[in-house]
Image (spheres, helix red, strand yellow):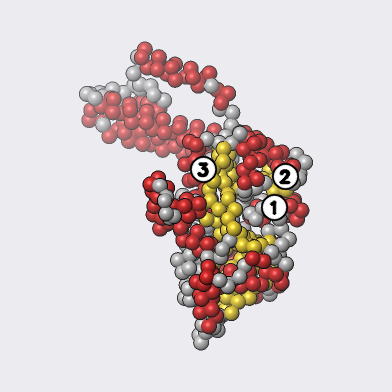
Amino acid sequence: RHSLVGVIISLALLAPLLVHRKEFAALPDPRSRWRALANFVLMSAGSLALGMLIVSVHGHRMVGNPSVADRLTHVVYGLFGFEGPLDYRGNTSWTVAFSLGALGWITAATTIYLAFRPEHPAARLTEEDESRLRALLAKHGGRDSLGHFALRRDKAVVFSPSGKAAVTYRVVSGVMLASGDPIGDVEAWPGAIERFMDEAKAHSWTPAVMGCSETGGEVWTRETGLDALELGDEAVVDVADFSLAGRAMRNVRQMVKRIERAGYETRVRRIRDLGDAELERIRRAAEDWRGTDTERGFSMALGRIGDPSDGDCLIATAHKQDDEPGEYGDLKAILHFVPWGEDGVSLDLMRRDRSADPGMNELLIVAALQAAPKLGITRISLNFAMFRSALARGEKIGAGPVLRAWRGLLVFLSRWFQIESLYKFNAKFQPRWEPRFVVYRASADLPRIGFAAMQAEGFVNLALPVPRFLRRRRTAQRPCAHAVAERDMRAA
């Protein structure tokens, strides 16, 4: 156990660490140092107690009758990988030594990890940061339909040196995940991007951008040397070109008329025009009608409804008078839109009562499009359709075997992630498709980025589940802390 070969192996492992020590320059998480100390104390105490049990359980094979002090000394030596004063018959000495060494290794490894792990901050958008972002959006918010989603309060932000541009992000599983284009003046984007990359390097985070536009992707790749990959397309409907007439809109037209004949009516208003009582009822309904226990949304989700600072948000509601009104009266479905500059809105969430007739989403989207001219809205961004081009080309005649296989895989995954159904739902409204990209450092990072994105969007949850009644109580205390729900397309 103290052979020359062991020394040579240890030195061989130490040499490259010394040579490449400059690569280990990431800033540690300052909060983890106290956790490391607590871990060391607790793990050491547990290891001593378990070590005494391991040493004593083999008492019938022990040579002589050592005292408690000798046994404790043997445990301490063993935790550090040295031989203690005790001896056993047969191979028991090896068993005890390796068991004690394993306990010592686990204690050391967990303590070192906590002491030196990169920082995993709990992102929070401060009031000052939010105020600065709103000022940038007031000037440049019409450039990107995802701009308003930068105001999620579980994101952090870095500003350019001039303060004319910013990048919002969240750190998930060691990935520094930005969404959409930088906010602000395009000329100042490089400064904000440089700050973003410096922050990622300082903490050893993997930089990535989800859902940026073609212009944003060009700036990111030019300024950082990162690569870009087309992720999907965003459906944008120009209000002036929209009409229910024509064969292409036949299914939507028939569905809307059928629902209207069933007694449903719609209302499209700005958030600031709703009363407090109605707004609170809509909040509670949106929470209860969420299709999953895990709240979903990040890149195209604001995470709240009815905040006083979001008065320009648009809300479309469906109503129907019932013989026995439910908890939320005649309210049956909700669509919430966030501002996209002065003349546009971007779809945030879609919620409906499960007992309502199918087609609520189509009804409310058509209602929003028809009410848009009166509200000064000329364009509406709908959902984001991942891998839309692959789905569209793969179903056409003449598609090759590789493209058909890729489309088949996407259709299979749609059972869980609604890839195909979301694309087909968006296509009903004859939108124009705007490509969106993921920006990444290396191909080897894509699986990690994809996993982090799924965590951020709420499709993967590694935290312990919170009982629903507890989550409701917490939500009632902070009524603006609603995240975006799963976009339920099954009824469509």
Vertically, is 67 above or below 370? above
* Cα–Cα gap, marks 1 and 3: 26 Å
Count up the numbered dots: 3
Marks 3/2: CA–CA distance: 26 Å
Front-most of residues 429 and 121: 429
Is disc 1 placed on a helix, strand or loop?
A: loop
Q: Kindly check if marks 1 and 3 are in contact, taking CB atoms under 8 A apart as contact.
A: no
Is there any visible trace of residue 97 in the rendered image?
A: yes
Q: Do the residues labelled 3 and 2 touch (CB within 8 Å)?
A: no
With respect to residue 279, does 451 lie above or below? Answer: above
Image coords of residue 431 (percent x, y): 58, 61
> Quarter-wise, where is residue 160 in the image?
top right
Point out the tag, 1 or 2, that comes first from the N-terminus.
Answer: 1
Residue at the top extreme, as displayed: 4
Q: Residues within 10 Å of mark 2 (few under 14, many from 20)?
A: some
Q: Position of residue 368 (x, y in %)?
A: 63, 70
Q: Nearer the viewer, residue 130 or 443?
A: 443
Residue at horizontal 62 percent and vertical 46 percent from the top: 214
- Image coords of residue 350 (percent x, y): 55, 66
Above or below 7: residue 156: below
Foreground: disc 3 or disc 2: 2
**In contact (CB < 8 Å): disc 1 and disc 2:** yes
Q: Mark 1 points at which residue?
A: 143
Residue pictured at 73% horizontal, 48% vertical = 184
- In three-dimensional space, the C-alpha distance between marks 1 and 2, rounded to whole angstroms, equals 9 Å
Label 2 amino acid? Val
Q: Nearer the viewer, mark 1 or mark 3?
A: 1
Q: Which amino acid type is marked by label 3?
A: Ile
**Residue highlighted by disc 2:** 186
Q: Mark 3 points at which residue?
A: 449
The vertical placement of 459 against 47, above or below, is below
Quick one: SS at disc 2? helix
